[in-house]
Amino acid sequence: MSDTTRTDTKAIPTPLPLLMRRVRYQLVPVLTLVICTTLAGWLWFRRGGSVTAIGSVSSLQLHVNSKVDGLLVEIPQKVQIFQSVSAGEVLARLDSSHIQAQIQRETDRLNTVRRQIELLNKSRPRTPATNPSTPAPSTGIGIIVPQKGAIARAALAADTTDNTDQEFSETMSNPLMQNKFSLEMLAQNLETKITELEQKILSQDIKAPISGTIVAIHRFPGQAVTAGQDIMTIASEKGDYIVTYVRQTQIIQPKDGMIVNVHLRSAPRTLRSHVLAVGPAIEKLPPEHLRDSRILEWGLPVHIAIPPDTNLRPGELVDLFFRPHDTPGT
């Protein structure tokens, strides 16, 4: 009777399915709460306590224009929109036919003056010398006028000169042109003018100021342009930094070297960077940095270094997380 009673009071083991159900209903919720609380605290420490901002990669755009008035002409290599160009490459050219015609005209005048100087040098030995004891009267322009006897001898010698001397006498009928010094000065002035015109032709070529991509073409060959008028627009291929704005409502004082986490929107990763420079004054935010395009905002501009090994395009937007409590190298 007693043995039967001891056997009846022995504990029955809990089945494994019931035990697993009890763990699922009682232990799993507690563990989930603890893990979620720990993860939320870590995320708050990493993200919630830092200032979030939107940054955009700097985009440099330059307008290509002409320094003088002119007419655009075709160039051997036609430029098109979205074409990549290098610095110094010829993008447009102004008509220089009138300058070339002027150079040709001045060159002909220079050649004429040089021939006159050569003729003057050849004929001078045949010119009779004046009497040194009798001063020659001056005409007031630095030209020596021979005496009467010299005039007679010169007339006699003129009968035996060839056709070249006769042509020279007709060309040099003007007393001012008989002065060799005046001819040399005139030749020097013509050479200077021709050099200036040649340099002006070089300025007719309009070159790219930077390497980049053509994003807009405003004038085409056959159209007239004025000095300073835009012909095309070039955008740089790479950004130099990331620009963002810290609003006055954000409690942070950005400083040079402050750590910033850069979250790329084009790839699910976050990179470490730092502040390059802080602007001196509050500025109005550009449209791409506004939370609501209908509400104007102001903020302090901050430049942030582009993380290495990233292919960020100019104008690309990224998310920024300032880490004021972190130190460089940690």
Image (spheres, rainbow, N blue to C red):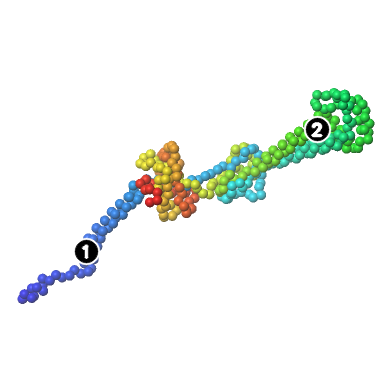
How many numbered circles does the render carry?
A: 2
Looking at the image, which is closer to me, 296 or 120?
120
Disc 1 from disc 2: Cα separation? 122 Å
Q: Residue 253's x, y, as percent?
A: 38, 41
Q: Residue 130's x, y, as percent?
A: 88, 28
Q: Residues within 10 Å of mark 1 (few under 14, many from 20)?
A: few
Looking at the image, which is closer to me, 216 or 244?
244
Q: Can residue 81 be seen in this view?
A: no
Residue 103 as seen in the image, left or right of residue 137: left
Residue 53 disc label: none
Q: Hey, which residue is sitting farthest front in the picture?
A: 133
| Residue on which disc 2 sits | 180
Residue 113 as seen in the image, left or right of residue 49: right
Q: Report the residue at 64% width, 41% height from top.
A: 223
Q: Report the residue at 43% width, 55% height from top.
A: 267
Q: Is residue 11 visible?
A: yes
Q: Which of marks 1 and 2 is nearer the N terminus?
A: 1
Q: How crowded is mark 2: few (under 14 residues within 10 Å), some or many (20 or more)?
A: some
Q: Residue 210's x, y, as percent?
A: 57, 46
Q: Which amino acid does label 2 sit on?
A: Lys
Up-down relation of residue 4 to residue 148 (above or below): below
Q: What residue type is labelled 1?
A: Arg
Q: Report the residue at 62% width, 37% height from top.
A: 227
Which is in the foreground here, disc 1 or disc 2?
A: 2
| Residue on which disc 1 sits | 22
Q: Hey, which residue is sitting farthest left in the picture?
A: 1
Q: Report the residue at 27% width, 58% height from top.
A: 32
Up-down relation of residue 229 to residue 84 (above or below): above
Looking at the image, which is closer to me, 131 or 101?
131
